[in-house]
Amino acid sequence: MLENHRTRLNSALAKLDGALERLARAALTLAPWPILYGMSIAVTAWVFTHPSRHAQLDTNKLTEVERRWMAGGAVAAIVGVALAYFLVMLARRARTRSWDFVGTVGRLNRALIPLLALPFVAALKLPNIEKDSPKSTIFFAALAALATGAGAYAWGRRVRLSPGLDDASELDGAPARGGRALATVARWLPPLALLAMWTGYTLFFSRLAITNHHALHTRTPDLGYYDNIFYQTIHGRPLGCSWLRAGYHGSAHFDPILILLSPLYLIYPRAEFLLILQSAWLGAGVVPVYLLARDKLDHRGKALLLAAVWAIYPALHGANMYEFHSLALISPLVVWLLYFYETGRDRLYWVTLAVLLLCREDVSLLMCFIGLYAIFDRRGVGRARLGWVTIATSLVYFVIVKLFFMTSAGIIMSGKDAYSFAYYYEELMPNRSGLGGMLVSLLTNPVFALKVLLEEPKIIFLLLLFVPLCFLPFLAKPGRWMLAYGLLFCLLASRDAVFSIHFQYSSILFPIAFVLTPIALKRIEGSGPTAYFGLDGRRLSRALLAAMLVAAALMSWKFGGLVENASFRGGFSRVARKLTPDQEATYAWVRQQVEAIPPNAIVGATSKMGPHVSNRKEAYFYPGDRAATVQYVLLDEGELKGKDLERHNAAVKRGELEELSRLKKMALFKRVKPPSKAQPPAPAASDEPPTGDPPPELRKPDRKDGGAPPAPSSTAEQDEDPPPGP
C-alpha cells in the first residue's frame, strides 16, 4: 500500500514538474511579448503627446515626475494588452469550448508584432535626426519595416490585399451580379489609382520646383544651361547653348532627346516649363512599374503598392528637384525598356532603346549591362542574340557620337572646347590621368580602391537607395548584373554629388532596382531555399511587400521631398517650400527687370540670375571675356568676389555701365559706353561663371580622408552638367 502511495506521489510530482516546465517555457516565450507591446504603445503615445520633450527623452533627461508618468502609462498599457488577450481567449472559449491558452497567446503574439514598430517610428520624431544621425534614422526605419513584415507574414495565412484587385479569373464562381461588380472594380481601380498617383506627383513637385526657382535657389548650371538649349533648339540651333564652350552642349554631353522635346517648349518658353516637364516625366514612372509588377506578381494590388513606392521614393525626389537634367529622364524609360523585354515585345524594346540612347551619350554604357543581362537570361529563345545586339548597337552609337557629334572623342572628355569629367574620379585618376590612370590604380592599389568604394557616405548612399526596397534587387539573379555599372560609376567617384540621392546620378541605379524588385518577389514565391527554411513563399512575398511599403514611407518621411525634413535637398541647396514675403518681393523685382530687357539684347548674368534670362539667343556669364559684348547686366553683387568684383566696380566707375534698378545687392545695368581697352584681362576660362564663393547653403560639405575636393571657390564648381574645365 505504501508503495502505491509512493507511485502516485511520484506520478503527481512528475506531472507537476512537466506543468511547471511548460509554464516556465510559456512565461519565457509568450509573456514577454504582451509586455513589449504594452511598452511600445505607452512610449509611442507619450512621444506623440509631448512633442516639446523629444530632446530630453533622447538624452534620458526627463524630470522625475515625467519618468513616473511614463512608467505608470507603461503599466497601464501592459494591463490593457493583457486584458485584450483575455477577452480574445474568452471569445475563443465561447466559440470552441476550449481555452487553448498557449496556442491563442502564440497567435496573438505573432499577429501583434507590428506594434514593435511603433517605438522606432516615435524615435524618428526626434527633430533633425535625419541630418544629425542618418545611420540611426535608416536603422530605425529598417527595424520598423522588419517588425511590420514579420506581422504581415503571420497574417498572411488568411489575409489578402483585396479580392477585387486580384486577377479576374479569381472571380469565377462568384454570384454573377457580385462578380461583375468586382470585375468592374478590378478593371477601373488600378488605372484610376495610377492616374491619381501620376497627377498628384506632377502637381506637387511642379509646384515645389517652381517655388524653389522663384526663391532664386536655382542656378545657371544647370537650369540656365538647359533652358538656353531648348530656346536655341527651337530657333534653329540644335543643342546650342551660349553659356558653354563652343556654344554647344556637345562640349559636355550629347542629348538629342532635347531636340525631340523642344517643340513643347513653345507652350511656355521659360525655365518653369522644364521643371514641370521633368516632374510629369518622372511621375509617369508609376505606369511601367505597375505594369511590370502586375506581370511578374500576377496581382494588381501588389503592383499598385510597388507603384506607390516609386512615387514616394527619396532618390526620385532628389533627382526631380535638382534643377533639370537629361540624365534624369532615363528613369521611367529604363523601366519601360525592361518591361518590354520581360514581356517579349521586341519591337517596342528596340524603340525604347533608341529613345534611351538619345537621352545622353553615356547611357549607351548602361545599356551594355542590360544587354549582358539578356545574354545571361536563359528563359527564352533569342534572348542572348538580343543581348549582344543591344551591346553592339550601344557601343557603335557611343563611338559615332564621340567622333562626330561631340567636341572631344575621349570617354571622360578633354581639350579646350570640352569639359573634362576627370575630376569626378580624381582619387583614382591622379593628375587627371584619365581612364588609363584609373585602371592602373585599380590594378596596382586595389586596397585603396576598396577604401574609396567603402567610404561611409557611399554606404549611406546605398542604404538610402536599397532600404526602401528591402535590398530585394540583389536577390534577382542574373538581373542584378545590371546594377554593376551604376554601382561602379557612383562608388568609385570622388565627387560627393555622384553618390548622393540629391542629384541626378542615382537615375542610373534606382530604375533598375525597381525592375528587379518584382522579379525578386516572384523568385521568392517559388524559391527552394524559402521552403527549406519552412517558410511559405507567397506569404513571405506579401510580408516583404508590406515591409517595403513601411520602409519606403519612413525613408520618404525623413529623406524625401514630400514632407519637409532636415535632410532633403535639391542638389546643393535646401528646397524652398513656400516663398516668404521678402522672397516674393525679390522675385517680383527680378521678373520686372527681366521683362524690361529687350528680347534680342545680349545679357550678362551671374549664376543666380542666369536661369531667369536664359531664354534668349545670347546670354553669358558676367563678368567674363564676353563682358565687353553684353548690352545688359543682371547680377547679384553678392556672387562677385575678388577680381571679378573689382572689374565690375571699375566698369561702373568709368561710366561704361549705367544702373537702371537696384534691390539690395541685386541690380540691373545697361551698357552705355564701350569697354575701355585698359581694363584688366579676362580670365582664361572664357565660358566659366565668375569667381566667387558660393552662398553658404550651396557649399558642398567637407569630406574626410578620401573625400571630394573642399568647398568650391567658384560658382562654376557648383554645376553638375557640365563640370568646370581643368
Image (cartoon, rainbow, N blue to C red):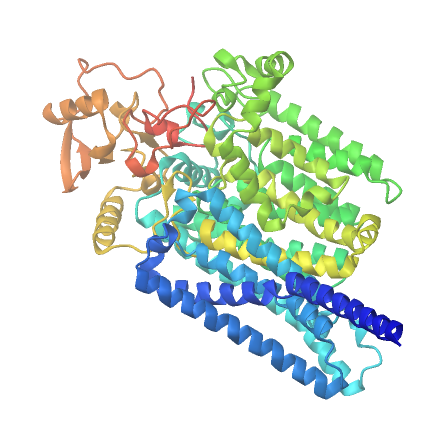
Give percent across and percent down for residue 67.
Answer: 36, 62
Tell me: 711 left or right of 387: left
Position of the N terminus, as image quadrant, is: bottom right
- Examine the image and state in which quarter residue 481 appears: top right
Give percent across and percent down for residue 8.
Answer: 84, 74
The residue closer to the viewer here, 101 or 527, is: 101
- Examine the image and state in which quarter residue 664 appears: top left
Q: Is residue 281 visible?
A: no
Tell me: 617 left or right of 448: left
Q: How many numbered marks appear?
A: 0
The residue closer to the viewer here, 38 or 162, is: 38
Q: Is residue 391 visible?
A: yes
Identify whether 647 is placed above or below 178.
Answer: above
Give percent across and percent down for residue 276.
Answer: 46, 52
Residue drawn at 70 percent across, 61 percent down? 542
- In the displayed image of the protein, which residue is found farthest to the front? 2
- Examine the image and state in which quarter residue 452 appears: top right
Residue drawn at 62 percent across, 66 percent down? 31
Identify whether 210 is placed above or below 443.
Answer: below
Identify whether 589 is placed above or below 680.
Answer: below
Position of the C terminus, as image quadrant, is: top left
Residue drawn at 32 percent across, 40 percent down? 613
The residue closer to the viewer here, 517 or 576, is: 517
Give percent across and percent down for residue 150.
Answer: 66, 59
Tell me: 94 left or right of 689: right
